[in-house]
Amino acid sequence: DSGVTQTPKHLITATGQRVTLRCSPRSGDLSVYWYQQSLDQGLQFLIQYYNGEERAKGNILERFSAQQFPDLHSELNLSSLELGDSALYFCASSVGIDSRRTDTQYFGPGTRLTVL
Amino acid sequence: AQKITQTQPGMFVQEKEAVTLDCTYDTSDPSYGLFWYKQPSSGEMIFLIYQGSYDQQNATEGRYSLNFQKARKSANLVISASQLGDSAMYFCAMREGENTGNQFYFGTGTSLTVIP
């Protein structure tokens, strides 16, 4: 158990809908990262937050947004869902004091999203 | 150019034997960190081992060791005395620089199957 929690574990929804994925980082970790893992794209970095502020952006679509709250939990919002958004969405956290190269990311169990 | 290359999509190893999973990386930054993660069929991403670019010795964590060859830009994972529970996908990842706030770059993974 990495100490990172994600809810829900599974989510099934229809095209055009909006969903929210939730992540609680390990105790003491200030950085939260979101990743999308699909069969054809592999593991794709979406976005990073550090202590409530957006820190880095990867291949995140305009239809997706995220935020990190004062209690450091994070939410990833996916809207106008398409079939291709079906994937495993991971949250990871790290101490992230300076985002140094030594800063290990610990992953949550993931949320499996299925868009029908 | 790919930042992380894992050229072995699938590997097989006999139980109790050692196996090496290949990883090469591409960076011009003198400061970087290399990571290996394991993803069993249950889906979670488990951190295994870390190697820093300035580390003089190869990293070891139990049965895992990292064969770090800086000049060749390779960071191969060696699993000794393979166990059935080692069957999983293995991902190599890299973070460049200090204080960058940047994301990890992940390879496409190697699927390891341990044969009884």
Image (cartoon, coloured by chain):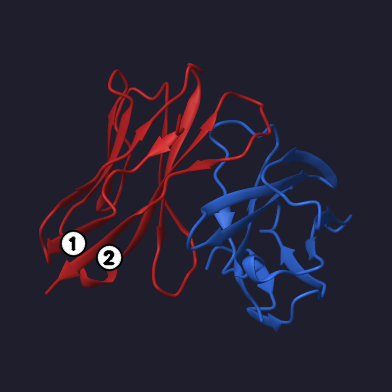
Left or right of B97? Residue A48 is: right
Amino acid type assigned to the residue bearing label 2 in the image? Asp
| Total marks placed | 2
Rendering coords of residue A58 (x, y %): 68, 42
Rendering coords of residue A83 (x, y %): 65, 71
Which residue is at a point 39% across and 68% down the rendered structure image?
B40
Q: Which mark is drawn over residue B86?
A: 2
Q: Which chain's colour is red? A: B
Left or right of B34? Residue A97 is: right
Chain letter of the residue carrying label 1: B
Left or right of B26? Residue B80 is: left
Instruction: Give the quadrant of residue A84.
Output: bottom right
On whether disc 1 and disc 2 are found on a single subunit, the reply is yes
| Residue at the disc numbered 1 | B82
Which residue is at a point 66% across and 59% down the rendered structure image?
A26
Secondary structure at badge 1 equals: loop
Q: Are marks 1 and 2 in contact (CB under 8 Å)?
A: yes
